[in-house]
Image: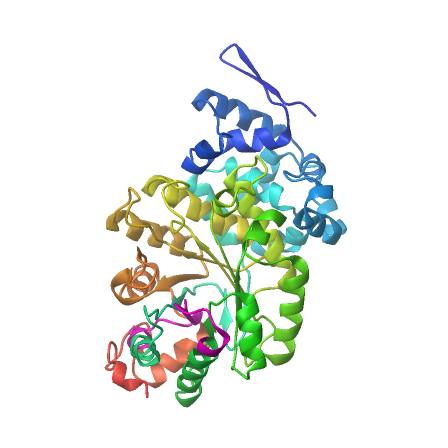
Amino acid sequence: MRLTATIRGASYTFTSVKEVLAKANGPKSGDDLAGVSARDAVERVAARAVLSQLTLAELRENPVVPYEEDELTRLVEDTLNENAFAAVSALTVGQFREWLLDTKTSGSTIRSIASGLTPEMAAAVAKLMSNLDLMVAGAKCEVVVRANNTLGLPGRTSSRLQPNHPTDDVEGILLTTREGLSYGCGDAVIGVNPATDTPESTAEILKALHDVRVRNKIPTQHCVLSHVTVQMKALEFGGPMDLMFQSMSGSEKGNRAFGISVALMDEAYAQMKAGRSSTGPNFMYFETGQGSALSSAAHHGADQVTLEARCYGFARRYTPFLVNTVVGFIGPEYLADGRQITRAGLEDHFMGKLLGVPMGCDACYTYHADMGQDEVESLKVLLGAAGCTYLMSLPLGDDIMLNYQSTSFHDIPSVRGLLGKRPAPEFDAWLSSVGIMDGDRPGERFGDPSVIR
């Protein structure tokens, strides 16, 4: 394994695959903060030259967190599909990139090798891709899932309706829910970030959302994004739960900071499988974001793109219905500006889909990041064109509970119309049946929340 490259007559030698992965990464403020980024653009080119010649087999042999130290590394290694891995193991990262972008390589072919890829492989090839490469390859990687409706089909863009309320007032949550539904949002999930993380409040909100969904025969899912242990208690209380949620990180240590482990998530999965109120085979929901491991000093000296990919390797165990990268939410310490946030959103979407999980993206930014409305709107369109499974939707794109900027109710029909996309098929039919949509155009009741009882 050769970890040396010569650029412009200067020789660059790297000490490990982990260092190569980190220094091949595009500029990220989080990598600067961690002290793992390239010194300059020339060293970055040298790292990419070395990375392009590493084989996928060599990446498998060199995870960024050792097998002995991390349960996520062990999980990925012990469950890797050996037949799928054998089909691509001899490829260099550069050859893998060319194979993914080749017009003769179909989405179904890519899907067939997903279970044989480690997160480090997905991160490595992403580092050799331009933004357009990430979009082209990401659009190929179709991942179709089902709960109460079907997501991920070609020509479809879905949305999470996010009716957050700063005091968890149920009537306020329901008013926002009705408004969002009236604009054709919410086919991915009606998902509330609770202000009060208790089993009782979680169950109360779940029941209220469930009643609206059932009463109006809306083919979608609901979820309250409490900690997984709180949701487990709420499920014991009889709260109707379509999807179970948890934030996750890319290392065992990072997940401990979230209060979870593989064993706990296995237990939650088993409980949800037995007690869920949704009908399909997929019922788990995970959120991630570049920088989560570094924020808890759990990055093991690795870069944030590679650690983000490891989140998807963890999520893959539970065949989730939704995975969402909240791309600009952690803050400018990790993604400084619109350019870095845009790049991260496209990277995350591609890596998740390549590893076989359905990927949504919260195209968002915090108020102290160097990003504006035009840039976040551009990112939404790029993600829609790249085949992103779903985007967020909330009133005016301004979350009054979490205090950040995201996607508005109005943005979803605009992006769909611009790109010729439709909602999930079951939800699409419901929108037409109640007059919110008329085919691919707004119907007579579009924007009228009174249509939802």
Residue displayed at 37% across by 46% down? 331
Q: Is residue 90 left or right of residue 268?
A: right
Quadrant location of the C terminus in the rendered image: bottom left
Residue displayed at 48% across by 67% down? 226
Foreground of the two, 364 or 152 = 364
Q: Is residue 98 above or below residue 381?
A: above
Foreground of the two, 68 or 43 = 68
Q: Is residue 364 above or below residue 449?
A: above
The reply to whether the magenta stretch includes residue 111 is no
Residue 165 lies in quadrant: bottom left
Residue 180's spot in the image, x, y percent?
Answer: 31, 73
Residue displayed at 27% across by 67% down? 395
The reply to whether the magenta stretch includes residue 197 is yes
Q: Is residue 314 above or below residue 29?
A: below
Q: Is residue 119 left or right of residue 325?
A: right
Residue 394 lies in quadrant: bottom left
Q: Is residue 332 above or below residue 52?
A: below
Foreground of the two, 67 or 197 = 197
Quadrant location of the N terminus in the rendered image: top right
Start-end of magenta stretch? 179-201
Q: Is residue 244 visible?
A: yes
Q: Which colour assignment does the render follow? A: rainbow
Residue 354's spot in the image, x, y percent?
Answer: 57, 51
